Amino acid sequence: MIDFSQFDSLIAMTTYFNNEEVCKNAIIETRWGVGEQQDVVCPYCGKHHIKMSKSGRFHCTACNHNFSCKVGTIFEDSNLSLVKWFIAMYLISSHKKGISSHQLSRDIKVTQKTAWYMLHKVRSLYAQNYSEVLSGEVECDEVYIGGKEKWKHASMRTPNTQGRSTKTKTPVFGMMERSTIINAKGEEEFMSYVRAMVVEKTDKAALLPIISQCIGEGSIVFTDELNAYNQVGEMGYEHRICNHGALQFVCEDDGSVYTNNIEGFWSHFRRMITGCYHDVSDEHLQSYIDEACFRWNTRKMTESERFSQMFHISIGLVKPNREFILCEVA
Ligand SMILES: [Zn+2]
C-alpha cells in the first residue's frame, strides 16, 4: 500500500505521481487491495467476478459491465489526466486561503473553464460530515454574507439592508467545539472544530433543530443574546449567553463565556471569499462554507495528512473526519 506520509511537499507528490499508470494503481490498490489480497468489487452488481483486461479496464462476468478504476470517484466523468487531478487536489488543499480558477489554470496548464470545473469537483469533497457530533463547550453564532451594500453608490442601495437584514444577504449559522489535540511535541494544544451552513432565517424554527442534531446532549452552549436561542437551556444543554449588545464580549463568571473562536472563523471565511473568490452566488455559498470548514478543521494536519484525507474522500472511501480515520462510507 502507498505510504501517504511521504507526500509532505508538492515536489514529493509530483515525483511519485508522475504518470497515469502510477495514479491508476494508487486508486486500484487503495480501493481494492494489492496482489493476492486484491478484491475488486463490481460497482454495478456488487459481485466479485472480475477480470482485468490488458488496457487496465475491468470486466464483470456476472453482469457484463466494463468499468475503470475511476468509476464512482470524482474523476469518473473527466478525460483529464489523473496526474493533473492529483496536483490540483494537492494545490487546492495546501493553499490556506483557497486558490482561484485563474491561478489553478496557470499552475497545471488547463483552461480557466476546466480549472473552475476541477475546483467545483474538489470542493464537493469537502461536504461536511454531520454524523460527527460536537460536544463539550460549543460556541454558536450567525452571520450574514453577501450584498456588499456599503460599496454601492447610494442610489443603488437597497433600503434598510444594514445589519441582520436578509434582503440582500444570506444568513449562515455556525457551531464551534472548543477542543484540544496532542501536537507533534506531545503537548496538549487548543483546537476547535466548526460546522456551518446556510439557513433560511435565524429564528428558533431554523436554528434549534440544527443545534439539537449537531451538538451532543449535556454540552455547554455559548451564544449571543439573539431571541432564537432562548430555549437552548431547555434542550438538554447548559446555556450561557454573551451579551454583545452591551459590548460584553467576554462576560460574567470564569471568563469562558464568549464566542470569539467562531467569530475568528467568520473573519477567516470572509477573507477567503473576498481575497480569492471575490464574490459568491447564493447557489454556491454552501460549497464555499464547506471548503472553509474543511480548511479550518484540518489546519493542524500536515500537508501529507490533508492530501491523504482528500485522496481517500475522492475515491469514496471516507467522509471528512477530524482525526482522519479510515472508515466505511455509509
Ligand atoms: Zn457486475
Image: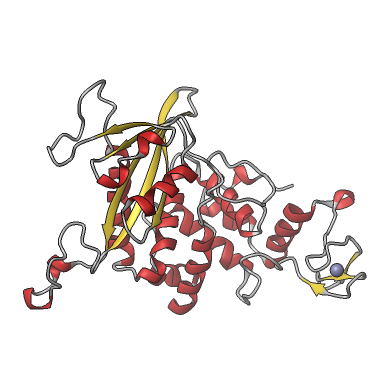
Across and down, in percent, residue 39 comes to 85, 55
The one of 211 and 70 positioned closer to us in this rendering: 211
Asked if residue 224 lies left or right of residue 323, the reply is: left
Residue 298 in sight in this render: no
Q: Residue at x 34, y 56 (%)?
A: 172
> Residue 56 in the image: x percent, y percent?
81, 69
- Is residue 50 rendered to the left or right of residue 288? right
Pick whichever, 170 or 11, lies toward us: 170
Answer above or below: position of 49 versus 222: below
Outermost residue on the left side: it is 154
Q: Nearer the viewer, residue 288 or 230?
A: 230
- Foreground: 198 or 322? 198
Quadrant hosting ligand 1:
bottom right
Q: Position of residue 159 (x, y in %)?
A: 12, 70
| Residue 208 makes an appearance in the image | yes
Residue at image x 30%, y 68%?
A: 279
Q: How is the image coloured?
A: secondary structure
Residue 255: horizontal and vertical position, in percent? 25, 24
For the point 44% across and 23% down, the residue is: 188
- Residue 156, picture quadrant: bottom left
Where is residue 234, by image quadrant? top left
Determine the residue positioned at 72% across, 65% down. Answer: 21
Q: Please state the total of marks drawn on the protein image.
A: 0
249 w.r.t. 168: above or below:
above
